[in-house]
Amino acid sequence: MAKHVSAIRQQRRSVRRTKINKTNTSALRTEVKKVRSLIEDQNKESARKALPQAYSVIDRSVKKGTIHANTGARYKSRLGRQVEAVKPAPAK
């Protein structure tokens, strides 16, 4: 347990930041999973529509420092390529 005043204060700050980071990471994972499930279902139109929302959450996570900038860029790049690689559903 921390004994110095500054260490106690830092520990409180760490707990707060951890909670915020977990919230942001959870939101990020949820959005990425939504897009990935649409890709898996071969639903190109819906995946394209969900992509900007996912990009927004990724950018917000980078801005808040939850993930590194290169990690965010990698997520966006991979999701974009995967959406474009989906074959459109055959016409009925």
Image (cartoon, helix red, strand yellow):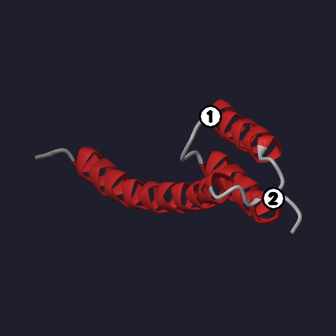
The one nearer the camera, 3 or 65, is: 65
On the image, the x and y values in percent for residue 19 come to 38, 61
Amino acid type indicated by mark 2: Ala
Q: Residue furthest front?
A: 92
Q: Dot 2, crowdedness within 10 Å: few (<14), some or many (≥20)?
A: few
- Residue 89's disc is 2
Q: Dot 1, crowdedness within 10 Å: few (<14), some or many (≥20)?
A: few
Q: Residue at x 62, y 34 (%)?
A: 71
Res. 32 image quadrant: bottom right
Q: Are marks 2 and 1 in contact (CB under 8 Å)?
A: no
User: Helix, strand or loop at disc 1?
Assistant: helix
On the image, the x and y values in percent for residue 85 come to 79, 40
Left or right of 87, for residue 4: left
Instruction: Indicate whether 65 appears above or below 38.
Output: above
On the image, the x and y values in percent for residue 37 come to 59, 58
Amino acid type indicated by mark 1: Thr
- Residue 71's disc is 1
Give the mark nearer the N terminus: 2 vs 1.
1
Work out how far the residue at label 2 is from the one at label 1, CA to CA, in angstroms. 31 Å
Left or right of 49, for residue 72: left
User: Helix, strand or loop at disc 2?
Assistant: loop
Left or right of 82, for residue 71: left
Q: Residue at x 71, y 55 (%)?
A: 42
Q: From the viewer's perspective, is the residue at label 2 or at label 1 nearer?
A: 2
The one nearer the camera, 91 or 70, is: 91
